[in-house]
């Protein structure tokens, strides 16, 4: 879908960001998210294939919370390596935003984080910040949970569940965006998050299935 057709549905400053980054079109999950209330502070659970454009949905929500709600955005990831990857990419794409990363084992508040617009954390680190009642937490307007299907993971799932439960109770006005390519029970999870479910099967490269035998693949 052409970006220009959504100009009236996207806040002007955010639309300018997209144009500056060279976007001319939007992918299906992005247009569906806008229609589902992305810029109206609706909680969203976006369940679409890998590389379908979910991260941009999260970025747009974060920008909306930072620019229009004058708040902060927290981007939760399961792994330090992914946190580092997102930090580098966001610093490159949004040089005018103040972006921080915190994934350390130290159980402390790290007050400098409050001077930033977008804070990238692991679920364990955000759990620590919430328990220590960091003073900037009250100004968080957007919380993004990447790989949210890990709620079902026996090691990381409980911490992520606690974090999201605290957010829902202590930050009722914060917008929650859940992202995943693999969720077995999306409707139930969306209901728990009080979120609009955004589903789509579009992917940039067609997925084909086949059987490999004796050096040959027979596609089904």
Image: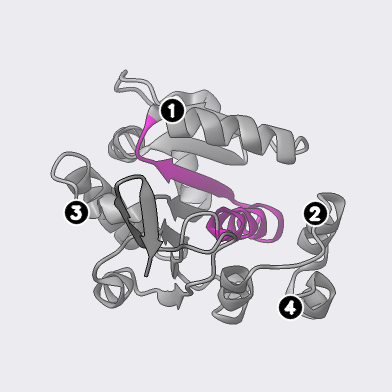
Q: Are marks 2 and 3 in contact (CB under 8 Å)?
A: no
Q: Work out whether residue 166 can be spotted.
A: no
Q: What residue lies at 60% left-to-right and 81% top-to-bottom?
A: 35
> Of label 4 and label 3, which has the lower sequence position?
4
Of circles 2 and 3, which is in front? Answer: 3
Q: What residue lies at 45% left-to-right and 34% top-to-bottom?
A: 82
Q: Work out whether residue 24 can be spotted.
A: yes
Distance, label 3 to label 1, CA atoms, is: 20 Å
Q: Are marks 3 and 1 in contact (CB under 8 Å)?
A: no
Q: Secondary structure at mark 1?
A: helix
* 128 vs 220: above or below: above
Q: What residue would you read off at disc 1?
A: 81
Q: What residue would you read off at disc 3?
A: 152
Q: What residue lies at 37% left-to-right and 61% top-to-bottom?
A: 218
> Of label 3 and label 1, which has the lower sequence position?
1
Give the position of the C terminus as an image quadrant: bottom left
Q: What residue would you read off at disc 2?
A: 17
Distance, label 4 to label 1, CA atoms, is: 35 Å
Q: Secondary structure at mark 4?
A: helix
Q: Are marks 1 and 2 in contact (CB under 8 Å)?
A: no
Of circles 4 and 1, which is in front? Answer: 1
Distance, label 4 to label 3, CA atoms, is: 35 Å
Of circles 1 and 2, which is in front? Answer: 1
Of circles 4 and 3, which is in front? Answer: 3
Magenta residues? 52-79
Q: Secondary structure at mark 2?
A: helix
Q: What residue would you read off at disc 4?
A: 9
Kindly indicate the quadrant of the structure image that contains residue 217: bottom left
* 9 vs 54: above or below: below
Q: Horizontal placement of 131 versus 55: left or right?
A: left
Residue 44 in the image: state x and y as whole percent: 46, 69
Outermost residue toward the top in this view: 106
């Amino acid at each position: 879908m052409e970006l220009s057709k959504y100009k009236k549905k996207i806040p002007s400053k955010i639309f300018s960001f997209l144009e500056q980054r060279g976007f001319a079109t939007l992918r299906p999950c992005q247009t569906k998210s806008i229609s589902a209330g992305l810029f109206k502070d609706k909680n969203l659970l976006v369940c679409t294939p890998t590389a379908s454009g979910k991260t941009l949905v999260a970025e747009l929500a974060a920008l909306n919370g930072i620019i229009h709600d004058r708040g902060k955005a927290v981007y939760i990831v399961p792994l330090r390596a992914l946190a580092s990857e997102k930090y580098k990419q966001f610093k490159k794409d949004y040089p005018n935003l103040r972006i921080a990363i915190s994934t350390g084992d130290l159980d402390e508040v790290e007050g400098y984080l409050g001077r930033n617009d977008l804070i990238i954390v692991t679920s364990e680190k955000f759990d620590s910040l919430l328990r220590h009642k960091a003073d900037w937490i009250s100004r968080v307007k957007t919380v993004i949970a990447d790989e949210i299907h890990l709620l079902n993971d026996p090691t990381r799932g409980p911490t992520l569940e606690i974090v999201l439960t605290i957010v829902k109770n202590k930050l009722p006005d914060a917008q929650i965006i859940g992202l995943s390519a693999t969720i077995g029970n999306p409707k139930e999870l969306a209901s728990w998050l009080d979120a609009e479910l955004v589903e789509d099967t579009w992917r940039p490269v067609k997925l084909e299935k086949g059987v490999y035998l004796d050096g040959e693949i027979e596609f089904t």
